[in-house]
Each structure stands twice: as structure tokens, then as C-alpha cells.
Amino acid sequence: MSHKRVTKRKAIIAAGGVAALGAAAILLPQANASQDGTSDGAASVKTLKAGDASDLASQLEKLLGDAFAGSYYDDAGKQLVVNVVNVSGDKNNVVVQAEKAGAKIREVENSTAELEAAAKTLKAKATVPGTSWAVDPRTNKILVTADSTVTGNKWDQVDSTVKTLGSGMATIRKSAGTLKPLVSGGDAIFGGGARCSLGFNVTAGDGSPAFLTAGHCGVAAEQWSDSQNGQPIATVDQATFPGDGDFALVKYDDPNTQAPSEVNTGQQTVAISQAAEATVGTQVFRMGSTTGLNDGQVLGLDATVNYPEGTVTGLIQTDVCAEPGDSGGSLFTQDGQAIGLTSGGSGDCTVGGETFFQPVTTALAAVGATLGDGGAGAGDAAGGGAGAGAVDENGDGIDDNTGEAIQGGGDAGAGAVDENGDGIDDNTGEAIQGGGDAGAGAVDENGDGIDDNTGEAIQGGGDAAADGGADQNANGGADASGDGQDQAGNGKNRKGGSGQDGSGVNESH
């Protein structure tokens, strides 16, 4: 799918896997506070990647409970800042643990409960089209925005409501643009005269290939094409707008459509590794069919936006620019995490403005879908031959330039082979979990894919000696030729694909 134009501001995207930050490895329950307010054990603020900071923030929110008052990512210092309330005298144990985990702790006045109560007041008394509000953890206040249409009595209504909350609870600002969903007529994905952008490919709950886009696109048209006046390629299955979000699940009409988990930026393809929650302060990238690739920062979470068509809640507020036709487009991080779907905003990519996004995690949960192709594919070779992105064009999972195994490579599932490409740990002599030229968990310690207790092939299992994976007896595995093709000749797996025959249409965007 082509793009109308590529951004004025190009960014180098490094796609790859994101290491999860395990709570057990970072939280130290025995930490104690010293009299000077610092914790024993040389607690220090850690330098974190944005994705790791998001994971840590989720852990600390649970740990701190009512003391947690939001968090944000300091992109310049690469640090997670966590707001806490009700910390008097010596720091309580959980705050010390948060410091030991590597977060920067900041004491603030407004609790999460107080900010939520203020947001409810705004909803009850200041729901005016052209307004929005979201909690800004950097100021520990609610940021209220009113666009150029909010004038006269409307402005007075919003302004007086903000003042009743108190000067320390909320701030209000004017926006020069007009707040609206960013849909228009043009190119990209088309339906009923409307133009939107594809967000992320997913697998629907029934296993069929699909994609996510904006809900206001989903309610605008039932069928969508990848070219103007072209034949429909996908049909809306579910759509939410306005209300509790702005998202739609659109299923491809051809069940054999290949739907890889990636974003085409026009300059390169970015592999999307997982869906993740947004963190205020994180640098994010937006791809849309009108303005191409642009970047900015997350400004607020759980935003309420009062479009002319109705109120939408639970959105992400950013300073990334967008224009009509970008609706539904993908918001993601540099390390390949799916964050959001473009909803709407004010301004444009000449003067700037604010743009709101539907969180991907919420959309996936609501429609019952999973990110990417889910490892599923047509044909008997599904589960054999390769995992997503696992092999190079030779099908052997070995980088031709370095001679080392591609991460997740070896004609197999994620993390399947070591640098020798044989799936055997050189130190222990045992098979790496998910290793051996086969599927995840495919081989036993002998590396032959045969269960020593039952004598039967392990599902997805493979013979570690076979270049390309499982022997013909392994359930779901590739034959000794390494092409993932069973004796009947169907389901050949190509280039780390999903087991499909290669005839499907690639509609990543």
C-alpha cells in the first residue's frame, strides 16, 4: 500500500525485541530508609528504555497502591519519575522499594483519587464540543484544552468549572485549531467515500486475519479497499465510536491474507514486537496515509475528548501532529511496541497541535484480538520451518554476514538456536528451550523432537541435526529438506512466514 507522502521529519527506527523487566529481579523487599531520607543499599535512579520504564511503572502502581499518583518518562535523562502522596517523615517501605527498583520518586499534592474526582466534575459540568482533558503527571494537574470553537458562553462554562476545582488541580489552555476526528476523502484505505489509515494487523478471536483502525472509520463504512474505487478487501466486524474508545476491528475478506505485525513507514518496515501501555514523556512515532511518519511525546493518559460527534474517553494525548486521513494510523515506539491508533486532534503538521490516540491494549482486549498474525497460518507446515521473523531468505536462521543465529531464528520459534544454529547449549549440552531448528519447546535434551517417555513426536518438534527443522514424523514440523513442506506438498513456509502459501495480500501499513 503506497503512502501519499513521507514526512518532512524523518526518523531512524530500530525495530527489535523488547526485554521485559521482571518484578522479581528489581524489587527488593528488605530495603530500609535511613534518617537522611535516602535508602540503605545505595539506591540510585536507573537509566531505562521507554518500554522498560512502562513495565516498571505498571509494577510500581500496584506496589504503591493509594500512594501512587501517576508517573512519566524523563526522555532526556532516560529515567522513570513516579509521583507519590501521603509520604511523611521516614519513607514507608513501599516507597523505599520503588527507589530501589530504580525509579525517581517525587512527592506531590494531588492523589490519583482527587484527580479522578476532578475529571468527573469536568464531565458533568464542562462537556462542551471542542474540549478535552487529561491528567498531566508532570504538573500533577488536569490539563484542559479548548479549541477555537469554544467561545462566549461555552468558554465561560468551561473556565468557571476549571476555577471551581482550585488553582492547584487543573489548568486550561486555548488551541488555535479545531478538534475533530481525522478522517477525509482521498487515498490509503477507502470506504464509502472516506479515507483512513490502517493501524496494526491482528488476529481476530476466531483466528482470521484482521486489522485495527479508528472506530469513527469503522462506523463510516462497512467495507474497505486498499485503493480508491477498488474492490473491498476487508469488512468491519466491530466498531466503537463515540463512547468508551475509538477503535474498529476489520477482518480481511480472504482468510489466507498474510497480515504481518509490522508498520510500513514508506522508507522502511518496522517490526512490531508487542502491544504496550503508553507512558507520559515517551517519544512515540505516528504513521498515517496523509502525513507519513512524524514523532513527538505522550502528554497525558485517560484523556476525555469532546468531538462534535460525541464524547470519547480513555485516549492518549500527544503533541504529535496529524491531519485528515491519518485516522486509524499506528502509534508506536522506536523499539517496536504498538501503542495507539490515531483518533483525532486539532492543528496540522505545519503549525503543530495535539493529537489523541486509542490505546492498542484496550482495543485488543475489547475486540478479543491479538497483535500480529498470532503465529497461525494455512497449511500443514504451520508450526514447522520458522517463527515470525526467524529466518533469513535462505531459511536457515543464520545471518549470512556474521555467521551467527538470528534472534528467534534457526528455522524455529523465538530464541530457538545458539550461535552454532543447532539449538544445543554449548555449556550444558542440553537443548535450548524452543530450540533445535523447530518450534517453541520443540526438542528434548537429545535434540531429536521425540518424547523419551512416549516415543511420540513433540508437537512442533524437530530433529536438531536437520537443517530447517523437524523430520517428517514431527507434528507440525518441517521435513529434512528444511522447507516446512509436508509430503503432500502443501503449506510450504516461506521466509519465516506464518505457514501460508504466499498467495495472500500483504496489507501492512
Image: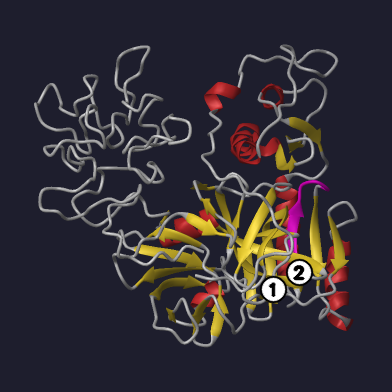
Q: What type is the residue that disc 1 sits on? A: Glu
Task: Tell me which label, 1 or 2, sits earlier in the chain.
Answer: 1
Residue picked out by circle 2: 349
Q: Position of residue 185 (x, y in %)?
A: 59, 84
Vertically, is 184 above or below 138? below
Disc 2 secondary structure class? loop
Determine whether, in the image, residue 108 is placed left or right of residue 406: right
Q: Is residue 135 magenta?
A: yes
> Seen in the image, is 440 located left or right of residue 68?
left
Tag 1 residue: 323
Q: Amino acid at mark 2?
A: Cys
Q: Please tell me whether residue 5 is drawn above or below residue 407 in the rendered image.
A: below
Of residues 2 and 296, the one nearer the viewer is: 2
At a point 54% along the width and 38% down the height, the residue shown is 18
Q: Which residues are magenta?
A: 133-139
- Residue 214's spot in the image, x, y percent? 55, 70
Q: Position of residue 128 (x, y in %)?
A: 75, 76
Which residue lies at the image location 49% right of the left edge and 47% below the top edge? Answer: 274
